[in-house]
Each structure stands twice: as C-alpha cells, then as structure tokens.
C-alpha cells in the first residue's frame, strides 16, 4: 500500500527497542490537546467488566493516573488517563506492561447504561508490517453496579454518506464517511484550495447511544505510519475524547490523548464553498 512517506520497516527486535526507549514518554505527542482529566474512575474505585461467557476484566483505580488490572491471574499496575467524553461517558486507556507485541486497551464506559466498548490493540499486524497496529473491538457490561439499560453497543453504518469538519489541535480536516469500513480524510489548510492530503483509511464505527448522539470511531492511519486512532464522539456538542497509539512518523512510540475541539456536519453546498473559499468560510469561528 502506498504511504505518504516511506516508513522504516523495523524488525521485531528493533520495535521492542523503540517501544522501551527510556529517553521518551509515549504520553505526549504532536496533537496532544485533551480534555481535562476525569477523576470519576478513581472515585468509583473498582469496576468489573463482564464480556462474553465467563470472561471478565477486573480493574482497580488506585489514583488519578494509576490502576491495577488482572492479567493471567496476576495484578499489574499501569499508568492510565481518563476523560469525560460526554456526561457520565468515560474514555480511558492504558498500556499493558509487560506485553509483547506491545498491547494497549482503550475503553468507552457508559456509567448511565453500564455498557462498555473495549478496543484491544497491539503493535504488529500480520497483513501489513510489524510496525502497523491492529485492533479488535469487543463489548461488555459493568458487573454489580446496577441494572444494564439502554440498547447494546454495536457496530453501525449510521455515518455512511455524511461529511463532517473537525478541528484536532490546530488542524482542520474533513471526514467523508464513505462506508461502514472506511473513511476519506482531507487534511486542510486555512487558505482556499489548501488541501494538504486526501487519503482513505480503514475505520470502525460503534453506536453507543443514538438518542444522546454518542459514537466510538476507530481507525488506522495506513497511508502514514500505521498508528491507531480512537475517540468517543459526542455529536450533540461536536466534540470528542480520544487517543493515538503506535510508532509515529518520526519513529517514536506514542500512546497519548487527543480531542476533537470543534466540529460541524457539512452540506453539499458547504463542501463546494469550502473548496472555493477555504475552511473558515464554512466553520466560522468554531
């Protein structure tokens, strides 16, 4: 697959060295504009996520950025970050240390319905290369916290055919949601006709709650270094809380929070005007 920049094709040994490089922290990156950190999980203390059958994930949130979770019968202590994507909808993520290939888990936890979407990701993808990320989305409920209500989290094609403009950090871009497995991403400048890049990326869409306009969006930047992006999107406010995970274009390991700071659904007329007069002609002072 053609990449917008040739990526270093590391061996697995070299990837391990990149991931464990002590000179860098993975929790800061180029688009690091997260929402304020949430303390709701720390206040809850413990949560058990019930998956299919008898499978469970046990978590204990021991501090604002410290948790314990059980893996193979052993409790591991991890750094984590937690953000409120919408009222009582928490997005949190953490690395799994030690793990090889390097694993990461990201969660959308709906404390209103006690339903959960989990993205299990790792560096290494058999279809592409050892540096590309792969991920698997699963669903769970919160055990022992009360009734599980609302509709189940599920994959969706609700976005198909729609276009949205988003501001991430100081960058504007548009997403063309072309079908339920891909989206077309235009990275924009501020001047008319200043499209830096147009690329199609594989994506996954999960409906959290249609009435509250809440969705999970996850994608892999296959035209670039193969990193994973995921965020919980609140379309009632056109904002989100999310993260990036993988080895970036400068060959550094990253696992850091980001957010969509503003957004707008674009009509056909908006899109014509955008390409003629520039992004601010359709988003104003958002």
Image (cartoon, rainbow, N blue to C red):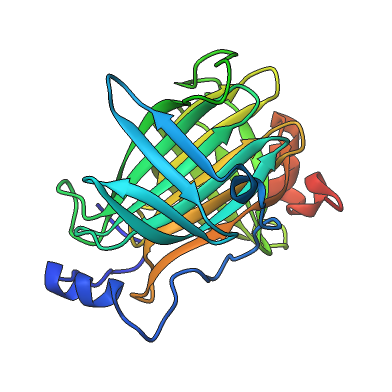
Residue 219: quadrant of the picture? top left
Residue 269 position in % (x across, y down): 75, 32
From the viewer's side, name the closer residue of 166 and 153. 153
From the viewer's side, name the closer residue of 117 and 47. 47
Q: Residue at x 57, y 59 (%)?
A: 63
Residue 131 position in % (x across, y down): 24, 62
Q: Residue at x 83, y 50 (%)?
A: 286
Residue 201 position in % (x across, y down): 40, 44
Residue 7: quadrant of the picture? bottom left
Task: Looking at this view, name the residue that lies furthest to the bottom.
Answer: 23
Depicted 94 relative to depicted 120: above or below: below
Q: Residue at x 38, y 76 (%)?
A: 250
Residue 234: quadrant of the picture? top right
From the viewer's side, name the closer residue of 170 and 49. 49
Residue 159 seen in this snapshot: no
96 sits to left or right of 40: left
Q: Residue at x 65, y 63 (%)?
A: 33
Task: Looking at this view, name the residue that lies furthest to the right.
Answer: 285
Depicted 5 relative to depicted 221: above or below: below
Depicted 82 relative to depicted 8: above or below: above
From the viewer's side, name the closer residue of 271 and 76. 76
103 sits to left or right of 283: left
Depicted 22 relative to depicted 265: above or below: below
51 sits to left or right of 187: left
Residue 147 seen in this snapshot: yes
């Amino acid at each position: 697959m053609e990449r917008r920049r040739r990526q270093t094709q590391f061996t697995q040994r070299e990837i391990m060295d990149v991931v464990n490089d002590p000179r860098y922290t993975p929790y800061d990156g180029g688009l690091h504009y997260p929402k304020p950190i949430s303390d709701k999980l720390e206040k809850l203390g413990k949560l058990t996520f019930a998956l299919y059958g008898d499978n469970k994930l046990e978590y204990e949130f021991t501090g604002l950025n410290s948790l314990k979770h059980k893996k193979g019968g052993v409790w591991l202590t991890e750094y984590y970050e937690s953000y409120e994507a919408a009222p009582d909808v928490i997005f949190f993520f953490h690395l799994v240390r030690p793990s090889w290939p390097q694993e990461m888990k990201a969660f959308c936890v709906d404390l209103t319905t006690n339903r959960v979407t989990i993205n299990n990701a790792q560096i290494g993808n058999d279809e592409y290369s050892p540096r590309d990320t792969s991920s698997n989305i699963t669903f769970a409920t919160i055990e022992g916290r009360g009734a599980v209500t609302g509709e189940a989290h599920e994959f969706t094609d609700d976005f198909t055919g729609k276009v949205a403009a988003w501001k991430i950090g100081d960058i504007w871009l548009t997403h063309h949601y072309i079908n339920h497995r891909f989206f077309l991403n235009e990275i924009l400048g501020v001047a008319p006709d200043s499209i830096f890049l147009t690329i199609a990326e594989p994506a996954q869409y999960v409906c959290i709650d249609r009435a509250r306009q809440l969705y999970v969006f996850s994608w892999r930047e296959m035209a670039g270094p193969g990193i994973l992006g995921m965020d919980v999107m609140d379309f009632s406010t056109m904002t989100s809380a999310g993260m990036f995970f993988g080895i970036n274009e400068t060959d550094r390991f990253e696992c850091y929070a980001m957010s969509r700071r503003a957004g707008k659904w674009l009509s056909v007329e908006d899109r014509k005007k955008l390409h003629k007069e520039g992004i601010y002609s359709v988003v104003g002072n958002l």
